[in-house]
Amino acid sequence: MTYTNLTRNGLILAGSLRPFVTERAVARDVAAGSLVRVRRGAYVERERWESATPRERHILRIHSVVAATSKPVVIGGMSAAALWGMPVKGPWPTAVTVVEPQERGGRSAPGVRRTSVGFSSASLVEVHGVTVTDLARTTLDVARVHTFTDAIGSADWALWRKNPRGISVSDLTEELSRMAPRAGRAHLERVAAFASPLSDSFYESAARAAMHLLGFAAPELQVSMRDSQGEMFPDYFWRDVRIAGEFDGKEKYMRPQYSPRAPGETVWQEKKREDRLRALNLGVVRILTEHVENPQRLESLLVSAGVPRIAGR
C-alpha cells in the first residue's frame, strides 16, 4: 500500500496509522522491504530512505525521537548541526543528541544520546519545527568533537557573510564566555578566535586552518582585484609576495549554494579567472581537497609556490 498521505516530517508514525492500517500490515511491509523502520513506531518508505543523504537520514531520526515523547525535547550537538544545515566532517551519528536538565535524570537509550552538559546556559531556538541549541552553541559543540581544521570548516560557515541565519564573531565569543569551564576550552577559544565570515566553502576554510597549523603566513581573504573584465575575489592573497590562492575542491562545483552554474561551466570560469590573475602579474596556487586531507602535500605545494612562513615557525 501507499503511505504518502500518512507521513509527518517524512515519517510514517504508528500512532497515525492505527485507524487505517493494522500493525500486521506494517510488519508485512517492513519484512517485504517497502518500509524501513527508523525506530520503534516510526517508519519511512524505502524509496525515500534510499534517496536521502546521510544528513537527511539523521534528520529523520531526529523527528522520530521528537515524535516518540510528549515532553519538550531539545536537540543539540551534531544533531542540531544537521537541522541547521551546518557542514561537518565525518559521518553523521546514528544516535540523536538530546540536551536536557540534569534533574530529569534521563538515560541514553538505543538511538538517543542524552546529555545535560551546558543546558542551563544554552539559548534555544526552533529550526524546522524542532527546538535546538542556537547556532553559536551548536557551532561550539561541533567544534568540541572535531579537530581544529575541521572545526574551522564548520565555524566559518556559521559566520559566513552569505549565510542568512549566520552569526557574528562576537556571538561566538559571548556564547563561549557563558559556557562553564571544562576540558577542551582552549581548543574552543582557538576556534572562536580564528574563525572568519569570508571563506566560501568548508574545505576552503579547512585549508586556511591547515596552512596556519603548518606555520604559513595568514592570507588575506576575498581581496578585491580588478582588470578590464571587472572585479575578482581570489580565495587567498599573500600581498607581500603577490601570490593568489584558489581552492578547487569538487564541492565548489557540485553544490549550488557555492555556485549556481553547472559544474563544467564553473570549472571553465575558474580557469578564466586564473588566467586573469596571472595577467595581473600574480602567482597563482591551486589547492585541492586532497591537499587539505594530506598536510604534507599541502606543505609541499605552498613551499613550491613561494608562500611565506611565519618567522620562527
Image (cartoon, rainbow, N blue to C red):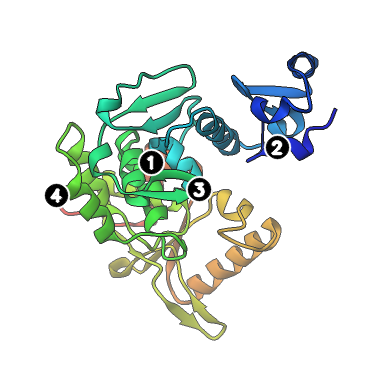
Q: Amino acid at mark 4?
A: Gly
| 88 lies above or below 45 | below
Whether residue 273 is visible to the viewer of this picture, yes or no, is yes
Percent position of residue 312, x then y: 14, 49
Residue positioned 21% across, 48% down in the render: 176
Q: Marks 2 and 4, Cα distance to the nearest angstrom?
A: 61 Å
Q: Marks 1 and 3, Cα distance to the nearest angstrom?
A: 16 Å
- Tell which circle, 1 or 2, labels the residue nearer the N-terminal end: 2
- Tell which circle, 4 or 3, labels the residue nearer the N-terminal end: 3
- For the image, the number of numbered tags is 4
Point out which mark residue 312 bears: 4
The mark closer to the camera, 2 or 3, is 2
Residue positioned 38% across, 41% down in the render: 150
| 128 lies above or below 241 | above
Residue wearing tag 3: 85
Q: Marks 4 and 3, Cα distance to the nearest angstrom?
A: 39 Å
Secondary structure of the residue carrying numbered label 4: loop
Residue 135 lies left or right of residue 259; in this view the side is left
The mark closer to the camera, 1 or 3, is 3
Percent position of residue 146, x then y: 35, 35
Secondary structure of the residue carrying numbered label 1: helix
Percent position of residue 219, x then y: 32, 61
Point out which mark residue 7 bears: 2
Residue wearing tag 1: 150
Q: Amino acid at mark 3?
A: Gly
- Tell which circle, 2 or 3, labels the residue nearer the N-terminal end: 2
Secondary structure of the residue carrying numbered label 2: strand
Residue 52 lies left or right of residue 126; in this view the side is right
Percent position of residue 257, x then y: 57, 58
The mark closer to the camera, 1 or 2, is 2
